[in-house]
Image (tube, rainbow, N blue to C red):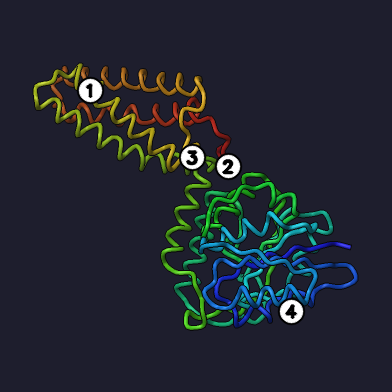
Amino acid sequence: MSRLSVVIPCFNEEKTLVTCVDRVLEIAGETLSIQIIIVDDYSTDSSLKVAHELMEIHPDISVLHHDFNQGKGAALRTGFQHATGDYVAVQDADLEYDPNDFKKLLKPLEDGNADVVLGSRFLSGDAHRVLYFWHSLGNRFLTLLSNIFTDLNLTDMETCYKVFRRDVIQGIEIKENRFGFEPEIVAKIAHLRLRIYEMGISYHGRSYEEGKKIGARDGLRAIYCILRYNAFQAPLPIQFFLYSLIGGVAAIVNYIIFMGLFTNGWAIHMAAPLAFVLAAAVNYFLVITFLFRHKARWKSALEVFFFLLVVLVGGGLDLFITRSLFHLDISPGSSKLIATALVFIFNFLGRRFLVFPEPSSGPWK
């Protein structure tokens, strides 16, 4: 017999929680037992009271709660830690998803073919409630953006229904507290090269008047999370594109500092290296924040050595090209711009393969 642990994050769902739990319990049978973990995220209604009443009735229900509101991702993080089943699933308390779909989502896992199974609202031929066009378009855009970075071909990255082998989900560190959990977990299972399946599910969405909580701010956070948790292992062309944006900012800093120093009487052999070093510091901060090893902070002596080596060689090339062009009667500003452009590719390759040698995914690794 298989055991499924269902984590239910709950925030102000007193009207639907009982029905939700009953529907989850109904899928138990001769070959499947159910553990329900309700995590109340500091509800301001009677959700926590209702959850405790359910726990007194059903021995397979446990209730956890937060002392302050943290968000869906935080509730799931808490719930996953207490799961004991063979498999772990997510169930929102708002009745938008049908627990009966868990039966088919479990099959690839039970057959030993999958490590993670995602339920797609866009693959199913079942009835779907018609709601917001722009919301649907936003979901598809975020899924596309996520797929570009993960090299997966999902149809519904933002789906609630995700079923995991317990050892898989308990081995992943979840950092996001709100709805950023969805792009974060998809990024991390993609990087682990897990066997991921996707199956169609039914969907009965709520309107905002009925209590839907996700909004535009969460969409922007999802974009940030896709970049944060994917960029350092994205396919090389994607990394180069992102580095072009970062390098563009650093190049502007480089040019502004150089011209400021030069027009104030600094010689080219002094102004160019100083501007390059300061721009390199800006570049380093941006790449560890948005692109390569996230929030890396001089983790080894070798990293420091290679970083300084790239800066010194790049700075030397920058100075050599700038001075050579200037001696050919090209203006200081144009000389600096040309030198910056020519050194750009060297900087990217040096940071990508020497300072931050992370394995990338997808084609052109």
The first of marks 1 and 3 along the sequence is 1
Q: Position of residue 296 (x, y in %)?
A: 48, 34
Residue occupying the point 25% across, 31% down: 254
Examine the rendered structure and indicate whether residue 211 appears above or below residue 157: below
| Point 18% across, 30% down: residue | 334
The amino acid at mark 1 is Ala
Q: In the rendering, at what x and y percent does residue 298 appear?
A: 46, 27
Mark 3 is on which residue type? His
Q: Nearer the viewer, residue 210 or 276?
A: 210
Quick one: quadrant of the C terminus? top right
Among the two numbered marks 2 and 3 on one chain, the one whose residue lies closer to the N terminus: 3
Which of the two marks, 4 or 3, is nearer to us in this view? 4
Q: Residues within 10 Å of mark 2 (few under 14, many from 20)?
A: few
Element assignment for label 3: loop
Give the number of the disc on residue 222. Answer: none
> Disc 4 marks which residue?
22
Q: Which of marks 2 and 1 precedes in the sequence? A: 1
Residue 318 higher or lower than 47, as above or below = above
**Residue 313: which quarter of the image?**
top left
**Is there any visible trace of residue 119 in the rendered image?**
no
| Residue picked out by circle 2 | 363
Sequence order check: which comes first, mark 4 or mark 1? 4
Q: Amino acid at mark 2?
A: Pro
Q: Residue at x 45, y 69 (%)?
A: 215
Name the image quarter holding residue 112.
bottom right
Residue 220 located left or right of residue 52: left
Residue bearing mark 1: 272
Which residue position holds label 3? 294
Is 215 or 76 nearer to us in this picture? 76
* Spatial CA span between label 4 and label 1: 70 Å
What element does badge 2 sit on?
loop
Give the alpha-carbon distance from disc 4 to disc 3, as whole Å: 42 Å
